[in-house]
Image (cartoon, rainbow, N blue to C red):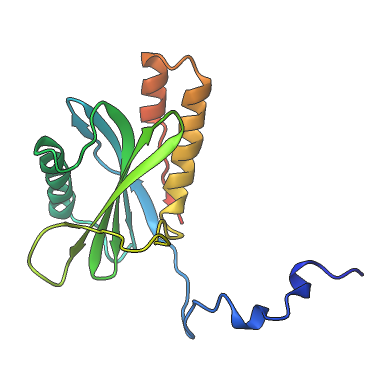
């Protein structure tokens, strides 16, 4: 039996040790929420949460109102775009990931967080480093689905019927 490439890495025991002792992976549920339909922006909506820590109606409404205000007041510069939003309940925070399609096949993203242990609203997450966090394992389910749905749109006639097909193509599952 021949040795694989990974078996030839002598320092493997010293790298990739990012999972703390005792960590147990658990699934979260991805559901399709109420979309955000503004005059020049349409975002499909996904909620991600653990079954014991669901996103409340109040939290969902607050997040949509926040995005609408950011766009209307031109702090979030998206206009004439299609995309999707992920509202992720993770621990003591809500993450709000806004993604739109640009330049034919690129995902552009703005990320906000709300600390649930303190009063206050969403704040943008600004990255000081070039190597930064993107998606976690739970967020990748809807992100991959959206990639596939956008490719189907790109391969289509890209008319209004195709846009409806894209907007109605949803991911709901456990991740």
The residue closer to the viewer here, 49 or 108, is 108
Query: Residue 152 in the image: x percent, y percent?
Result: 51, 27
The residue closer to the viewer here, 94 or 111, is 111
Instruction: Please state the total of marks drawn on the protein image.
Output: 0
Query: Residue 3 in the image: x percent, y percent?
Result: 85, 70
The answer to whether residue 154 is above or below residue 84 is above
Q: Is residue 55 left or right of residue 160?
A: left
Q: Is residue 116 left or right of residue 170?
A: left
Query: Which residue in the rendered view is the most extreme toward the right?
Result: 1
Q: Which residue sits at x=73%, y=80%? A: 10
| Residue 82 occupies quadrant | top left
The residue closer to the viewer here, 167 or 104, is 104
Q: Which residue sits at x=46%, y=33%? A: 105
Q: Which residue sits at x=43%, y=17%? A: 158
The residue closer to the viewer here, 175 or 108, is 108
Query: Residue 130 in the image: x percent, y percent?
Result: 40, 59
Q: Is residue 134 left or right of residue 96?
A: right
| Residue 85 occupies quadrant | top left
Query: Residue 84 in the image: x percent, y percent?
Result: 33, 39
Q: Which residue sits at x=21%, y=37%? A: 77
| Residue 26 occupies quadrant | bottom left
The answer to whether residue 67 is above or below residue 16 is above
In the rendered image, which quarter contains the N terminus?
bottom right
């Amino acid at each position: 039996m021949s040795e694989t490439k990974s078996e030839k890495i002598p320092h493997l025991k010293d790298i990739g040790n990012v999972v703390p002792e005792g960590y147990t992976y658990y699934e979260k549920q991805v559901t399709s929420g109420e979309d955000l339909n503004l005059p020049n922006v349409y975002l499909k909506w996904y909620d991600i949460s653990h079954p014991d820590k669901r996103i409340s109606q109040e939290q969902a409404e607050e997040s949509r109102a926040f995005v609408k205000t950011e766009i209307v007041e031109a702090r979030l510069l998206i206009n004439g775009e299609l995309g999707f939003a992920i509202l992720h309940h993770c621990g003591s925070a809500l993450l709000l990931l806004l993604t739109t399609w640009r330049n034919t096949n690129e995902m552009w993203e703005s990320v906000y967080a709300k600390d649930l242990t303190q009063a206050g609203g969403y704040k943008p997450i600004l990255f000081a480093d070039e190597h930064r966090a993107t998606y976690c394992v739970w967020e990748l389910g809807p992100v991959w689905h959206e990639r596939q749905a956008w490719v189907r749109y790109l391969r289509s006639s890209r008319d209004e019927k195709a846009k409806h097909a894209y907007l109605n193509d949803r991911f709901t599952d456990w991740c």
